[in-house]
Amino acid sequence: MEDKQPLLADLRLYCTLVRARGFAAAARALGVSNAYVSKRIALLEQSLQVKLLHRTTRSVTVTEQGGVVHQWALRILEDVDQMREAVSSEQSAPSGLLRICTSSGFGRNRVAPALSALALRYPALDVQLELLDRPVDLIGEGFHLDIRVGAAHEPHLMSRRIAANERVLCAAPAYLAQHGAPASLADLARHRCIVIRERNQDFGRWALQGPGGMETVKVAGPLSANNGEIVHQWALDGHGIILRSIWDVGPALEQGRLVRVLPAYAQPADVWAVYSSRLSTSAKVRVCVEFIEASLADRPAGPCCAPDVLRPRL
């Protein structure tokens, strides 16, 4: 009897389906029909002799065995991609799919321009960028690279610092004229602070480095959001004090539209490239990191910042 092994193309399709969380979404991502996706998944289930998915009219979830297959498929496909790179005679010209995630504001303003240059230099690369203002499971969600404002804490991942950065406290002149400026870190508890829940930030609790070392203050205010660009605009509108990266608020500080408060305090928030250890030697990941690092070095936040802000550290 013929032994039917699963096809690599079907494993890739299955990983896309799990990531997209639906047949229709996977079909759109792949540019194929729903019927084609259903057929290939059925053939994959037949070859593995397991049920991969629970399907209802409203949702698609992975079975326990489907989860095992997904993890193995990710590992197998990574190995195949690395094998191709290892034997390729064109290692200076990376190719294939490169999935990158980062936060929304930083992604639009800093990462996207670097990826534009990357795509022009290496047209054989298929670059997918996703902007996510939430914690990301790099391996489980199928990303090759995460560009983070703030360090990685997952022990199974590797990271490289690609630019220096810090978060600073600031507010609009109109807010300070009405409410005054805080004289100490403890004063922040009595001010209107615009709180953000973004990636690694602790909601409503600001930890800052100051003359006495690291200090923490609990803050609150009538406005909060999970998007940094919204919080930035609310601060410009005079609603309160924000804690934002210097790459974001540097121009507004230089122009006087925002004013830094408690300038002796700041929160370390360097920019890091985070990737799986199994991909640390990947040409496409390495080249991408270098492009983003160079782009950050070419676009400093402004003269109002500390001299080393957004300058790459190798």
Image (cartoon, rainbow, N blue to C red):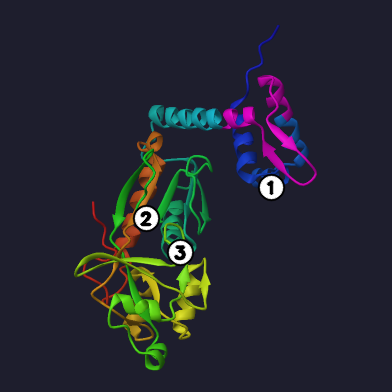
Which residue does the numbered mark 3 point to in the structure image? 203
> Callout 3: few (<14), some (14-19), or many (20+) C-alpha neighbours within 10 Å?
some
- Residue 227 in the figure: left or right of residue 33: left
Q: What residue lies at 32% left-to-right and 83% top-to-bottom?
A: 182
Q: Mark 2 against mark 3, which lies toward the viewer?
A: 3
Dot 2 or dot 3, earlier in sequence: 3
Tell me whether circle 3 and circle 1 mark residues in contact (CB < 8 Å): no
Residue 145 is situated, as x and y percent measured from the top left of the image, at: 43, 46
Q: Residues within 10 Å of mark 2 (few under 14, many from 20)?
A: many
**Is 24 drawn above or below residue 105 in the view shown?**
above
Estimate the x, y position of residue 157 in percent, counting from the top left: 38, 41
Dot 1, crowdedness within 10 Å: few (<14), some or many (≥20)?
Answer: some
Circle 3 or circle 1, nearest the eye? 3
> As rendered, which of 110 and 228 lies closer to the eye?
228
Dot label at residue 292: 2
> Nearer the viewer's eye, disc 2 or disc 1?
1
**Residue reaching furthest top?**
1
**Mark 2 or mark 1: which comes first in sequence?**
1
Q: Amino acid at mark 2?
A: Ile
Seen in the picture, residue 298 relative to 1 is either above or below; the reply is below
Tell me the kind of residue under disc 3: Phe
Q: Kindly identify the residue that appears in the image at 66 percent across and 16 percent down.
A: 4
| Mark 1 residue element | helix
Q: Distance from label 3 to label 1 (Cα)?
A: 32 Å
Q: Is residue 93 visible?
A: no
Q: Residue at x 47, y 68 (%)?
A: 196
Alpha carbon distance from label 2 to label 1: 29 Å
Q: Which residue is mark 1?
A: 25
Of residues 201 and 141, the one nearer the viewer is 201
Looking at the rendering, the stretch of residues picked out in magenta corresponds to 42-70
